[in-house]
Structure formats: C-alpha cells, structure tokens
Image: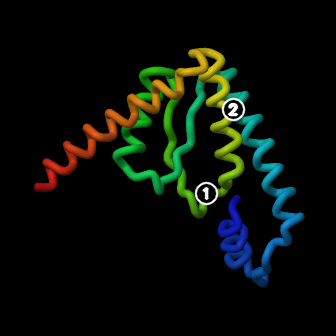
Amino acid sequence: MGFSSIHAQEKSEGVKSRAVPYAEWKKIEERFSKNGIEKAKKDIAREKPRIFVFDVAGPAIIEAKKQVYLEKFGVKVEKINACIDERGGSYADAYNDTIYQYIKTKYGDDALKKASSEIGRLFQQLLKISTVTKK
C-alpha cells in the first residue's frame, strides 16, 4: 500500500488525513517487502510465478514482456497500477526480485539479459504494427 493508497483509505474511512512519519512508513514498507518475498516463494513452489509490471510501462512493452516471460520461463506478467495498488511498490519489487532470482537459478545468470533483448525486439515490432494500424 503506497502512500497515496494509505491517504485515500484514510479519506474514505472518514479519518482526518495525516502524513505518515518516515519511521512508520519504513515499517510498513518492510512488512510489504517481506510479504512480497513470502508470496513469491509460495507461487514458485506452486509453479505459478508471475512478474508485476506497473501500468506506466505502456501497453506495447507490457505485451512484449507477457509473451517473452511466458514463453521462456512460464512466468505470467500481471499489470498493476503504479499509484494505487494496495500491495504497494515495495511488495511488487520484493516479489519480482525473488522471481528474478528464481529465473537466474533455473535458467542461468544471463537468462534475464537475453529475455530483455528479445523483449526489446518484440517491443519494436509491436510499435511498428501499432503505428501502421493507426494510419
């Protein structure tokens, strides 16, 4: 739960809005990070890993990541809202870091670098297709 989520929740519950002190925020962030790591480990054990991609990445890059990660690693890509997702950025970052480590362990240290190159090529193809269809 990012700061804006806490702020919005307080407003919707009729709580007087307040800034969250840094020390309190760090505790919240640490808890979300821990939860993200734990959930990623459970998803790996269930053979259901995924990667969270913030929606600001744009549709073409998200689609490219979806295709490459699923094909190469069996990992689904899930788009989340960068501003208001209740899991918060620290949850998603910790979750993703755990999945990236899993991918490196299972497929090799250069697997993510190779996937990134393939995502870049596919992204360029998708951009060309969308440009042509807009004309």
* Mark 2 secondary-structure assignment: helix
Q: Residue at x 67, y 39 (%)?
A: 95
Q: Residue at x 50, y 22 (%)?
A: 74
- Residue tagged 2: 98
Image quadrant in which you'd find residue 70:
top left
Instruction: Name the one closer to the observer, 69 or 122.
Output: 122
Q: Earlier in the sequence, mark 1 or mark 2?
A: 1
Image quadrant in which you'd find residue 98:
top right
The amino acid on which the numbered mark 1 sits, given as a three-letter code, is: Asp
For disc 2, the neighbor class at 10 Å (few under 14, some 14 to 19, many from 20) is many
* Residue 34 disc label: none
The amino acid on which the numbered mark 2 sits, given as a three-letter code, is: Thr
Q: Is residue 34 above or below residue 71?
A: below
Q: Position of residue 97 (x, y in %)?
A: 67, 36
- Residue tagged 1: 85
Kindly give the residue lying farthest to the right in the view shown. 23
Q: Is residue 10 above or below residue 68?
A: below
